[in-house]
């Protein structure tokens, strides 16, 4: 391995004392390959196994915490104890390759297609009817039930043997819908001011932490993923994100995970547009919790550029679809073996599930490929 890449492969110890072998993580990616009932399939186990071996941490695809939180066909579920045996296989598959297994827990909110949720009853923070998005507002009782469901999902992750959970508070899903002024126009305790809009994310975090305190018999990794900005007006700005990050940094998280299209992107509004978002967020955190960054980390030099900005953990998504042994090739100084586009004529070597493969082909430009 070239000496300059050594910072990517230093071990890292989370605040709770759990140590991972390097700074690289598999980003949580929807794979469209769980069984129809939400149980874990053999196809997704093969997919994860192929990418886990060389990484310190593997964050598995988002799992819905309630039946009405399902946002994708082939999404894994974690809303009932019946799913624990399959989830246990998933955790073991990761751990057998030497990585820590973290499962992302999730509710899609308005992003759930009506055909995937019971009775087509799509819910969100508020009544929404715009473009192709329609949802009804959750009642106070339903809000409390979903908060409890996140806690129960955490318990199931612990019982399944996972090393951690990550709350999916990013990408416009339900947790973010409550914080965003674009999707939250409530006038009760769950909406209005920044402080009220923040109540749901913080309550979800509290429910998960209570489950960890009660059920975990060993240190358990606790993460939170967030998106820093929304393009809409009104919508989340960096100013509001700084407020959320400041509050999250005072909680017992082991890492915060900033979700970006490009890890080195700069803000659109609400902050210095000449500096990267990750640097600005890291300043707000001020050493209280580690930051993980994701977004267009394709080459080893891309990863190094993120690491050099004092970001201890780097998540890689699409590049690990294309080159599952990406990290190994860096360590073995065989950079010429790294691929940067899928070769459609050699599909079998990638161990990509059928559902995900179809999405890749349909969304041309999302993952580069050659015919």
Image (cartoon, rainbow, N blue to C red):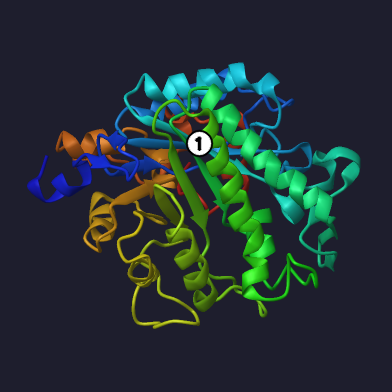
Position above or below: 243 against 205: below
Percent of width and height locating residue 47: 48, 27
Left or right of 111 on screen, residue 201: left
Q: Is residue 353 visible?
A: no
Marks counted in the figure total: 1
Report which quarter residue 349 is drawn in: top left
Residue 285: x %, y % from top left: 37, 65
Going by the image, does 120 lie left or right of 87?
A: right
Residue 103 seen in the current view: yes
How many residues crowd mark 1 within 10 Å: few (<14), some (14–19), many (20+)?
Answer: some
Q: Nearer the viewer, residue 105 or 287?
A: 287
- Give the camera-side residue of 230 and 250: 250
**Residue 71 percent location from the top left of the image:** 71, 45
Residue drawn at x 25%, y 39% is 22
Q: Secondary structure at mark 1?
A: helix
Is residue 151 found left or right of 122 in the rendered image? left
Residue for badge 1 = 213
């Amino acid at each position: 391995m070239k000496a300059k890449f050594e910072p990517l492969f230093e071990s890292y110890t989370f605040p709770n004392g759990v140590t991972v072998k390097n700074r690289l993580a598999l980003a949580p990616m929807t794979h469209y390959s769980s069984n129809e009932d939400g149980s874990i399939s053999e196809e997704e186990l093969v997919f994860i196994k192929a990418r886990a071996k060389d990484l310190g941490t593997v964050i598995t695809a988002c799992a819905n915490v309630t039946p009405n939180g399902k946002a994708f066909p082939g999404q894994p579920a974690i809303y009932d104890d019946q799913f624990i045996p399959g989830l246990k296989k998933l955790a073991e598959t990761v751990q057998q390759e030497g990585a820590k297994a973290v499962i992302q827990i999730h509710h899609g909110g308005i992003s759930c297609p009506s055909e995937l949720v019971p009775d087509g009853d799509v819910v969100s923070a508020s009544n929404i009817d715009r473009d192709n998005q329609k949802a009804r507002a959750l009642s106070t009782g339903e809000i409390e039930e979903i908060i409890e469901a996140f806690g129960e999902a955490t318990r199931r992750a612990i019982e399944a043997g996972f090393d951690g959970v990550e709350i999916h508070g990013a990408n416009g899903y339900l947790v973010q819908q409550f914080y965003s002024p674009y999707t939250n126009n409530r006038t009760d305790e769950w909406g209005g001011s920044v402080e009220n809009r923040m109540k749901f994310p913080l309550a979800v975090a509290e429910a998960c932490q209570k489950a960890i305190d009660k059920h975990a018999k060993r240190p358990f990794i606790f993460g939170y993923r967030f998106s820093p900005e929304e393009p809409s007006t009104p919508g989340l700005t960096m100013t509001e994100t700084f407020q959320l990050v400041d509050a999250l940094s005072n909680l017992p998280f082991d890492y915060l995970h900033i979700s970006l299209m490009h890890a080195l992107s700069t803000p659109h509004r609400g902050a210095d547009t000449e500096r990267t978002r990750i640097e600005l967020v890291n300043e707000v955190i001020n050493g209280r919790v580690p930051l993980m960054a994701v977004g267009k980390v394709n080459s080893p030099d891309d990863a190094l550029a993120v690491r050099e900005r004092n970001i201890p953990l780097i998540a890689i998504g699409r590049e690990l679809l294309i080159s599952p042994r990406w990290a190994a090739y860096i360590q073995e100084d065989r950079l010429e073996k790294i691929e940067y586009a899928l070769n459609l004529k050699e599909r079998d070597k990638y161990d990509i599930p059928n559902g995900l493969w179809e999405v890749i082909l349909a969304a041309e430009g999302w993952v580069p490929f050659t015919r």
